[in-house]
Image (spheres, rainbow, N blue to C red):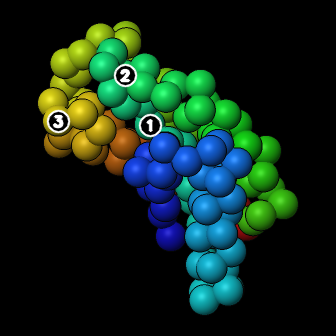
Amino acid sequence: MLLLIGTNDIGYPTCDIAWGILTAVKTVHATFPKAHVMVVSILPRGTNLMGADDKIRAVNATLQQASASARFAFLDVHDAFECGHKTPCPLFQPDLNLHLTSAGYDLLTGLLRKSMAAEPHRN
């Protein structure tokens, strides 16, 4: 199961965002005990893809650290979506630089496939 989660909660404190994501992972495991869960890092957002960057990086670091004990794979693709910190970026729709374009989803799909091929059965 793939979780692309957290960016809509960016207005909350860092620990609350991380707690919410970890709770979602626990819920998946409780419902589907044999599920392989992969959490994708929160992607950059906003003007020049720097909106809430410190908070996003802190949440991503917390998730990376918790991944083994919480039994999920963590795929940190944040930096692949930075577009040199320039907007507009072809990976994001020009709304709030929040939603991916087809090119963004193609990049994400490629990174997911590469990660899954390298570690197909982690958990």
Residue 123 versus residue 109 in the image, above or below: below
Nearest to the observer: residue 2 or residue 7:
7
Q: Which of marks 3 and 1 is nearer the N terminus?
A: 1
Image quarter in which the C terminus is found: bottom right
Q: What residue type is labelled 3?
A: Asp
Image height check: is 5 above or below 45? below
Q: Is mark 3 on a helix, strand or loop?
A: loop
Give the residue displayed 43% in from the left and 20% down from the top.
Answer: 50
Q: Are marks 3 and 1 in contact (CB under 8 Å)?
A: no
Classify mark 1: helix, strand or loop. Answer: loop
Image x and y of residue 19, in percent = 68, 59
In this rendering, position of residue 11 left or right of residue 76? left
Percent x, y of residue 71: 75, 65
- The quadrant holding residue 76 is top right
In the rendered structure, which disc, 2 or 3, sits on the residue that comes first in sequence? Answer: 2
Identify residue for label 2: 49
Residue 57 against residue 102 in the figure, above or below? above
- Residue under label 3, please give it: 95
- Is any part of residue 113 visible from this angle? no
CA neighbours of label 2 inside 10 A, class few (<14), some (14 to 19), many (20+): many
Q: Which amino acid does label 1 sit on?
A: Leu
Which residue type does callout 2 highlight? Leu
Disc number placed over residue 43 in the picture, else none = 1
Q: Which residue is drawn at 79% across and 44% down?
A: 65
10 Å neighbourhood of mark 3: few (<14), some, or many (≥20)? few
Separation (CA) of disc 3 from disc 1: 15 Å
